[in-house]
């Protein structure tokens, strides 16, 4: 049989690549290279999107692509040929002589298919629909799947590739210099996990855990440590084992019969990737290959008391499953949920309205605090420079206040009746009476000072035998007793090498006390409200090591309705959230893999056991993986097991299992990169480095990692090799990685600036290390929509809720003087109003006669009796609700010629623009290209 090199169409040559042990095919006329055997010229013309972008030399039509990019800019200045601002995004201009191969995969794919059908309406899709229908394929229209410009042609290639039917990855190369970022790509699913045939015991689409629970930076694992090192790609898992599940999403299956099959040697839980042997009486572990007996009751239906169907068991068909645990999984009986509220009642706290808002929110949410079994306990301790306890004996309707002034040696003034049973305290009316009266008790309080540390010790003493959650609400810098802090904010060191010192805890108390809490199964949530320096860096240590969360409301003033509404909403959601108690988490992996480092809010109890006293939903974790020995199996399995007690008193185990193919081919490793997971990992590592080194070191480390990846890609995957290249090549599946890294480098948490207050920076870092991917990605690469000319369906209700406008690239080139735009990062929403906005637009949205009388700043948007107002309000509401988590972003109106600080804050979200000393996306890409070619850097 002739080799591929002997079956070439005219105009092609083949060169044997020793490194990859395969032929590289070269088009002699243009220098274009590709790994796949070329087809006939006619086929090439019919399927232009299939071609990998050139390696080594630019094709002739690049100049036309640049004209297209210029056309995009031209549209914003009222070109008669291209009147619609959104047109360049979705409809490439039809210039004379323009050939189909000008179609840019990923940028204009949807409109390309629409143009083929002769339709003029630009297509827009909802990102939420994109996640549910990852292939974007229906009978009328074909859209490219993730990183695959032409699915049909690729499918033909896949059928000829791989071993034993397993499809290989086909690497598609993009040139970053000619492929501008398309934010719609962030809504696409990660590269497909292509396991060999019969890898699972049941043909279930749910066998691999959904990426929202667990995803890897690489969806094909290198078989050796040296191959991983050569790629320069980090290998890590990004995990959110407890995420909220909406009504229209599949629920996590619950196994209630307490029959739990685990490997005797490595303790892996049975999962879809094991093998049954010996007539089904034994199963072989997918991690360590040990043969185990199938439990006697595994095939018995306990509810019907008859033989059951083994294949209907959820753990054999679902990658994410939860077990009701038998008693041997309990160190002690399941404990009740305990909430201890520590409320700052100093002069500052009362005057800001925090005390009144907090007590009213607790009162209004008593019904929502998890308490199905009537066992939940609650205590309220107030503090200024003294501690105020409240006793409510059973049957008594009026609470008694007990004051402890000695904060140097904290003690409980009464052994009982301080920690109340929630149901009993409510039934007598005493708890409601207390919450109603606290603000009045302290409204004349003139004491300035905070004994937060002693208050934390008191809360700990109240709950230490049981464990639970301390929720501390503080409005000023702790100044009295243990944990007292000094104001160390110094504008002179901001932006210098000493700034990272302000991001580290100033007092060892907050770490040592956190470890003490972790041992006693106590976690801490911090709600911080100060208008002055509060040392968020020190206080956020407590949530960090106890698996809690920090919430920050700078300059909180409840007299502003928006401030009170945001805090009340978020605090209420925290109270209503189901929490998991006494949690331990461990990740197991196939032989040859080891968990090497851990990022997130927890305490590492032993080498790989993560202790979390309580876990709220929607926290994210990142765990780096080392390859310790050569992997000889066709795929590897990683399993996260989380043992916990529900807040309803049931011990459970959540098991999240993912399998990934193993490859010895570097191109397959690159083709499998999940750029979202990689960005999440880089954010966690950057913050960690700022604490151990300097902010500048963290920025350099992130930038250099990106350069390393691009250099390796160029030298290994392109014909340019180690030499200079006119392009900046990267895999199609990683095209958004550079702009995500740029967004991270410009994020408040690590941005180069001498203007960022340390509290703001520390809070941002707390978010970067705890948000799950769904919230973290918009936090570093915000969403940007044009509202004044959005499609007619945007803002209306579709099958999956409110339809969002198409997202725009984050550049001010998209702003128009007569326009209305929305920019949001999951924490803040900006409505940008152009100075030439017509009076009718201002009237329809803000109910004001003209732009001149519109005021910028924090606001609540009115809902008016016109369809445009209702659509804009629906988009704002959807923005606040579409992601998991408790956050309720403030809405700011930003006028184009309004207050400079607010305008600059909003513009800083447009990360593709130049800002201060930070480069634009084009400058960033140019510096990357220089660095990759060895000529300089960022």
Image (tube, grey):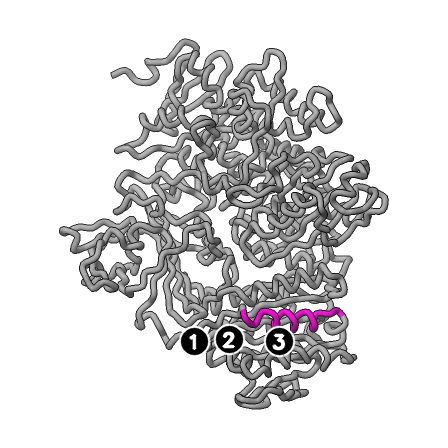
Q: Give x and y (percent) for residue 10.
A: 41, 9
Rendered position, 849 above or below 494: above
Q: Secondary structure at mark 2?
A: strand
* Outermost left residue: 279
Q: Nearer the viewer, residue 704 or 348?
A: 348
Which residue corresponds to the image point at 60% horizontal and 39% vertical from the top-left? 739
Instruction: Verify CB contact (< 8 Å) between mark 3 and mark 2.
Output: no
Q: Verify whether residue 814 appears in magenta.
A: no
Classify mark 2: residues with Cα within 10 Å, few (<14), some (14-19) or many (20+): many
Magenta residues (range): 352-367
Q: Give x and y (percent) for residue 71.
A: 67, 23
**Disc ID at residue 338:** 2
Residue that mark 3 sits on? 342
The quadrant holding residue 231 is: top left
Q: Give x and y (percent) for residue 91.
A: 60, 25
Classify mark 3: residues with Cα within 10 Å, few (<14), some (14-19) or many (20+): many
Residue that mark 1 sits on? 335
* Outermost front residue: 865
* Outermost right residue: 852
Q: Give x and y (percent) for residue 542.
A: 57, 68
Which residue corresponds to the image point at 45% horizontal and 30% vertical from the top-left? 148
Q: Secondary structure at mark 3?
A: strand
In the picture, measured across the screen, residue 294 lies left or right of residue 648, that is left
Instruction: Verify CB contact (< 8 Å) between mark 2 and mark 1.
Output: yes
Instruction: Verify CB contact (< 8 Å) between mark 1 and mark 3.
Output: no
């Amino acid at each position: 049989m002739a080799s591929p090199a002997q079956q070439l169409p005219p105009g092609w040559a083949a060169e044997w690549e020793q490194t990859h042990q395969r032929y590289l095919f070269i088009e002699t006329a243009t220098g274009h290279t590709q790994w796949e055997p070329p087809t006939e010229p006619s086929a090439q013309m019919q399927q232009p999107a299939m071609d990998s972008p050139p390696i080594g030399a630019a094709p002739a039509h690049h100049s036309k692509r640049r004209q297209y990019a210029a056309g995009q800019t031209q549209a914003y200045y009222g070109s008669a040929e291209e009147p619609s601002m959104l047109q360049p995004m979705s409809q490439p201009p039809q210039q004379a002589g323009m050939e189909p191969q000008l179609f840019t995969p990923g940028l204009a794919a949807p409109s390309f298919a629409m143009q083929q059908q002769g339709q003029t309406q630009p297509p827009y899709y909802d990102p939420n629909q994109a996640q549910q229908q990852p292939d974007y394929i229906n009978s009328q229209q074909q859209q490219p799947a993730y990183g695959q410009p032409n699915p049909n042609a690729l499918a033909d290639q896949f059928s000829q590739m791989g071993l034993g039917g397993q499809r290989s990855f086909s690497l598609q190369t993009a040139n970053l210099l000619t492929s501008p970022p398309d934010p719609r790509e962030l809504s696409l699913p990660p590269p497909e996990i292509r396991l060999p045939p019969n890898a699972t015991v049941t043909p279930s689409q749910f066998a691999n855990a959904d990426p929202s629970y667990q995803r890897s930076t690489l969806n094909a694992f290198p078989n050796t440590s040296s191959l991983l090192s050569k790629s320069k790609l980090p290998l890590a898992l990004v995990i959110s084992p407890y995420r909220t599940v909406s009504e229209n999403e599949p629920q996590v299956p619950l196994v209630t019969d307490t029959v739990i099959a685990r490997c005797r040697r490595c303790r892996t839980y049975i999962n879809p990737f094991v093998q049954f042997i010996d007539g089904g009486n034994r199963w072989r572990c997918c991690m360590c290959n040990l043969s185990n007996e199938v439990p006697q009751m595994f095939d018995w239906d306990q509810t019907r008391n008859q033989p059951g169907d083994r294949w209907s068991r959820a753990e054999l068909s679902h990658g994410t499953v939860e077990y009701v645990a038998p008693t041997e999984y309990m160190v002690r009986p399941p404990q009740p949920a305990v909430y201890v509220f520590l409320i700052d009642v100093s002069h500052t706290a009362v005057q800001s309205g925090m005390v009144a808002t907090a007590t009213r929110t607790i009162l209004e949410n008593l019904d929502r605090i998890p308490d199905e079994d009537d066992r939940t306990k609650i205590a309220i301790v107030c503090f200024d420079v003294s501690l105020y306890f409240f006793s409510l004996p059973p049957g008594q309707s009026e609470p008694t206040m007990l004051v402890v002034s000695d904060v140097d040696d904290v003690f409980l003034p009464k052994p009982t009746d301080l920690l109340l049973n929630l149901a009993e305290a409510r039934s007598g009316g005493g708890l409601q009476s207390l919450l109603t009266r606290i603000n009045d008790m302290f409204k004349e309080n003139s004491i300035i000072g905070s004994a937060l540390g002693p208050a934390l010790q008191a809360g700990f003493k109240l709950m230490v035998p049981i464990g639970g959650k301390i929720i501390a609400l503080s409005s000023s810098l702790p100044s009295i007793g243990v944990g007292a802090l000094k104001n160390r904010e110094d504008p002179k060191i901001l932006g210098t090498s000493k700034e990272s010192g302000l991001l580290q805890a100033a007092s060892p108390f907050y770490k040592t006390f956190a470890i003490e809490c972790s041992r006693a199964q106590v976690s801490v949530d911090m709600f911080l409200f100060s208008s002055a320096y509060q040392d968020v860096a020190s206080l956020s240590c407590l949530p960090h090591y106890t698996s809690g969360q920090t919430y920050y409301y700078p300059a909180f003033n409840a007299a502003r309705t928006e401030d009170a509404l945001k805090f009340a909403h978020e605090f209420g959601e925290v109270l209503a959230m189901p929490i998991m108690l006494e949690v331990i988490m461990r990740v197991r992996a196939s032989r040859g893999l080891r968990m090497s480092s851990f990022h997130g809010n927890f305490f590492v109890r032993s080498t790989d056991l993560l202790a979390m006293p309580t876990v709220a939903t929607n926290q994210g974790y990142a765990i780096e993986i080392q390859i310790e020995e050569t992997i000889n199996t066709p795929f590897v399995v990683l399993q996260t097991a989380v043992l916990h007690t529900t807040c309803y008193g049931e011990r459970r185990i959540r098991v999240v299992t993912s399998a990934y193919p193993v490859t010895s081919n570097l191109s397959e490793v690159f083709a499998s990169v999940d750029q979202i997971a990689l960005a999440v990992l880089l954010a966690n590592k950057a913050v960690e480095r700022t604490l151990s080194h300097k902010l500048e070191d963290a920025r350099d480390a992130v930038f250099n990692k990106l350069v390393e990846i691009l250099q390796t890609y160029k030298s290994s995957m392109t014909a340019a090799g180690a030499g200079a290249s006119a392009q900046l090549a990267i895999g199609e599946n990683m095209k958004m990685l550079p702009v995500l890294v740029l967004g991270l480098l410009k994020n408040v948490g690590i941005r180069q600036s001498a203007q960022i207050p340390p509290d703001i920076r520390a809070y941002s870092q707390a978010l970067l290390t705890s948000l799950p991917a769904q919230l973290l990605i918009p936090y570093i690469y915000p969403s940007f929509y044009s509202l004044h000319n959005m499609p007619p369906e945007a803002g209306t209700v579709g099958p999956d809720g409110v339809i969002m406008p198409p997202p725009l690239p984050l550049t001010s080139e998209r702003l128009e003087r007569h326009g209305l735009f929305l920019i949001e990062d999951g924490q803040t929403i900006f409505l940008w109003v152009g100075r030439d906005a017509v009076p009718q637009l201002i009237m329809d949205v803000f109910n004001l006669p003209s732009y001149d009388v519109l005021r910028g700043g924090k606001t609540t948007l009115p809902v008016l009796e016109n369809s445009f107002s209702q659509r804009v309000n629906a988009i704002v509401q959807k923005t606040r609700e579409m992601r998991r988590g408790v956050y309720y972003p403030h809405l700011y109106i930003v006028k184009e010629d309004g207050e400079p600080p607010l305008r600059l804050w909003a513009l800083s979200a447009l990360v593709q623009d130049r800002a201060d000393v930070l480069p634009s996306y084009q400058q960033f890409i140019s510096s990357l290209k220089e660095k990759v070619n060895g000529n300089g850097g960022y």
